[in-house]
Image: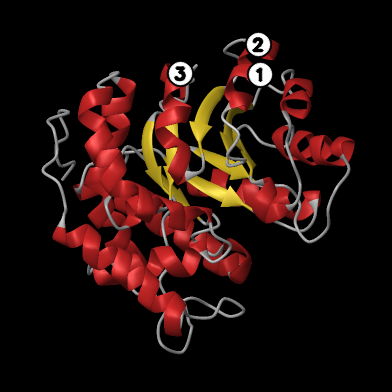
Amino acid sequence: MAARIGWEGVFPAVTTQFRPDFSLDIEATRRVMAGLIEDGVSGLIVCGTVGENTSLSRAEKVAVMEAAKDVAQGRVPVIAGVAEFTTAFAIETAREAARVGLDGIMVMPALVYSAKPHETAAHFRGVATATDLPVMVYNNPPIYKNDVTPDILASLADCDTIVCIKDSSGDTRRFTDMRNMVGDRFVLFAGLDDVVVESVMLGAAGWVSGMSNAFPREGETLFRLARAGRFEELRPLYDWFMPLLHLDARPDLVQCIKLCEEIMGRGSALTRPPRLPLTGEERRSVEDIMRKALATRPALPDVGLKSAA
């Protein structure tokens, strides 16, 4: 299944860049995408949570999709997040992704309200049956308050276009539960940074990563070590990375990741309201984590990682 769609490895959830007046800075966003590909990531997720999807207009989302398609030039898969308030709106966005020529979509639950399980399933089914693009189901119950349980996912096994699940529940037991229910029907992706190694051990073929925006080579190396079962080699890297990876599990993960990205010279920390910048002790704590990380940045084991540029 993973080989068929070509989705494996680290897919950073790419940040969307803004100018000081909060207008979309598409050229800066292109530079962020190009830098990640040059550092050897395996794919790109645009317009996800970290890409501030719900802060973008439809035209801006399409502009980001088109930029990603152009920057990638087929070197890595490009998947667009679909986070809309209704199934009909989600279908419209999915059709735009298809028109642009992207490789797939990552569909979030219909946001704003908490759905019943059968409503959640119906939303994914509605989008999946309206598109020919491969669909990654995105489950993030701590943030979106809608839980795509293994039971719900199993009920969608007859939807041919649903090929993948990104699980950000933090409960790695779910990978085993899903496999017991439907075998290898779905490609499994880790969605929460600070359980990535555990997720890979339990069958995750890929990782939609937040902190790999700031440290793409470290992220890809960690993932490849885990996939290869080189756990003694990865443990020092995972230990070093973990304080940063924990930032991905916070409600203000977007601000944290973009601040780290700015410190690394890879992008701007600016987020669009209602997301407001980190200030005071919160900002200092993230800066302290980064300061320590950069002072102790490890040499990376060889995993065959080469620049894609």
- 127 left or right, relative to 277: right
Disc nearest the viewer among 2 and 3: 2
In this view, the residue in front, 292 or 110, is: 292
What crowding class fits label 3: few (fewer than 14 Cα within 10 Å), some (14-19), or many (20 or more)? few
Q: Residue 245 placed where, x, y %? A: 40, 50
Tell me how far mark 2 sits from mark 3, CA to CA.
22 Å
Callout 1: 10 Å neighbours few (<14), some, many (20+)?
A: some
- The reply to whether residue 28 is visible in this rendering is no
Identified at 26% across, 27% down, the residue is 225
Residue on which disc 2 sits? 180
User: Which color scheme did the rendering employ for the protein?
Assistant: secondary structure
Residue linked to disc 3: 4
Q: Position of residue 68 (x, y in %)?
A: 39, 53
Q: Is residue 300 above or below residue 89?
A: above
Q: Mark 1: which secondary structure?
A: helix
Q: Which mark is residue 177?
A: 1
Badge number at residue 83: none
